[in-house]
Image (tube, rainbow, N blue to C red):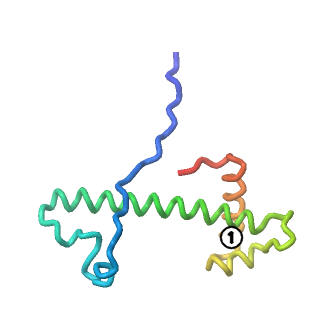
């Protein structure tokens, strides 16, 4: 008997902590990593941050795709062409077309969110 398929769980990385304006203005300051002296702790925390940034970037791309699909929707009287969307998002036209399709898949529930 086959085991039931397990849905891959969404990775929940460490939360991005708020950076005070003074700290963000200091180019050497990055989420207080520069103050961690233990290399094990530094590796752990910097890995958590890298995963959090990757997860945030993935989600942002999904939202870009959904917005592109909505802007290209032929039912909209003010719809945009792929070229218009590409210009606004600083993409190539081919990439904009792919993002519109990805956004449509996400809206239909066909694409698996990350």
Count residues near mark 1 (Cα–Cα under 10 Å), then give few for <14, some for 14-19, many for 20+. Answer: many
**Residue at (41, 49) in percent of width and height:** 12
Q: Is residue 5 above or below residue 24?
A: above
Q: Quadrant of residue 62?
A: bottom right
Q: Is residue 60 above or below residue 107?
A: below
Q: Is residue 92 above or below residue 64?
A: below
Q: Is residue 26 above or below residue 103?
A: below
**Residue at (34, 80) in percent of width and height:** 21
- The mark total stands at 1
Q: Secondary structure at mark 1?
A: helix
**Residue at (24, 70) in percent of width and height:** 32
Q: Picture coordinates of residue 61 (x, y %)?
A: 57, 63
Residue farthest along the top direction in this orientation: 1
**Residue at (12, 61) in percent of width and height:** 38
Residue farthest along the left direction in this orientation: 37
Q: Picture coordinates of residue 90 (x, y %)?
A: 62, 79
Residue under numbered circle 1: 96
Q: Picture coordinates of residue 40 (x, y %)?
A: 16, 57
Q: Quadrant of residue 65?
A: bottom right
- Answer left or right for 46 relative to 104: left
Nearer to the camera, 44 or 18: 18
- Answer left or right for 91 relative to 80: left
Q: Picture coordinates of residue 101 (x, y %)?
A: 71, 59
């Amino acid at each position: 008997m086959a085991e039931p398929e397990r849905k891959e769980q969404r990775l929940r990385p460490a939360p991005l902590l708020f950076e005070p304006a003074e700290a963000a203005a200091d180019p050497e300051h990055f989420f207080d990593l520069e103050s961690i002296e233990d290399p094990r702790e530094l590796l752990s925390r910097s890995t958590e941050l890298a995963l959090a940034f990757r997860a945030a970037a993935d989600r942002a791309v999904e939202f870009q795709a959904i917005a592109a699909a909505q802007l290209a929707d032929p039912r909209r009287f003010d719809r945009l062409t792929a070229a218009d969307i590409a210009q606004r998002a600083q993409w190539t036209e081919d990439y904009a077309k792919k993002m519109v399709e990805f956004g449509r898949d996400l809206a239909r529930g066909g694409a698996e969110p990350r």
